[in-house]
Image: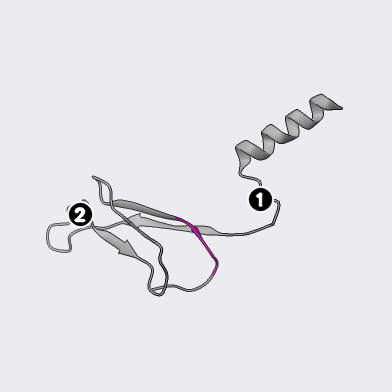
Amino acid sequence: MMLLSYILALFMLFTGFDPEGNSNGAIGGQIMDARNLQPLTGATIMIDGTDRGTATDLDGNFLIENVPPGRYN
């Protein structure tokens, strides 16, 4: 029984199990310069009306995690 408890605990740890059932998502993408189609490094991305945001990496990619369900600008 103890082994089963350890296995279950490891499963929940590595799968991101959320006991409260929150169903937050993520918003991601790539920011490119419209003129030359090159990735924009260090561009700031913010979700209007929230304190959530991030900056792009060297390839123009970004990911904002733990975003509650809804519509955003």
* Amino acid carrying mark 1 in the image: Asp
Q: Nearer the viewer, residue 35 or 2?
A: 2
* Percent position of residue 63, x then y: 39, 53
Count the labels in the image. Answer: 2
Looking at the image, is mark 2 or mark 1 earlier in the sequence?
A: 1
* Amino acid carrying mark 2 in the image: Leu
- Considering the whole magenta stretch, tell me its main secondary structure: strand
Question: In the picture, which quadrant includes the N terminus?
Answer: top right
Q: Is residue 54 left or right of residue 15?
A: left
Displayed quadrant of residue 3: top right
Q: Residue at horizontal 62%, vertical 40%? A: 15
Q: Nearer the viewer, residue 4 or 36?
A: 4
Q: What's the coloring here?
A: one colour
Query: What span is in magenta?
Result: 65-69
* Percent position of residue 41, x then y: 21, 51
59 in the magenta segment: no
Label 1 sits on a secondary structure element that is: loop
Q: Residue at horizontal 74%, vertical 29%? A: 7
Cα separation, mark 2 vs mark 1, equals 35 Å
Disc number lying in front (2 or 1): 1
Q: Residue at horizontal 17%, vertical 56%? A: 37
The residue that label 2 is drawn on is: 40
* Percent position of residue 19, x then y: 71, 51
Label 2 sits on a secondary structure element that is: loop
Q: Residue at horizontal 71%, vertical 35%? A: 9
Displayed quadrant of residue 6: top right
Dot 1 alpha-carbon crowd within 10 angstroms: few under 14, some 14 to 19, many 20 or more: few
Say if 70 sits above or below 64 in the image. Answer: below
The residue that label 1 is drawn on is: 18
Q: Is residue 26 left or right of residue 39?
A: right
* Percent position of residue 36, x then y: 12, 57
Dot 2 alpha-carbon crowd within 10 angstroms: few under 14, some 14 to 19, many 20 or more: some
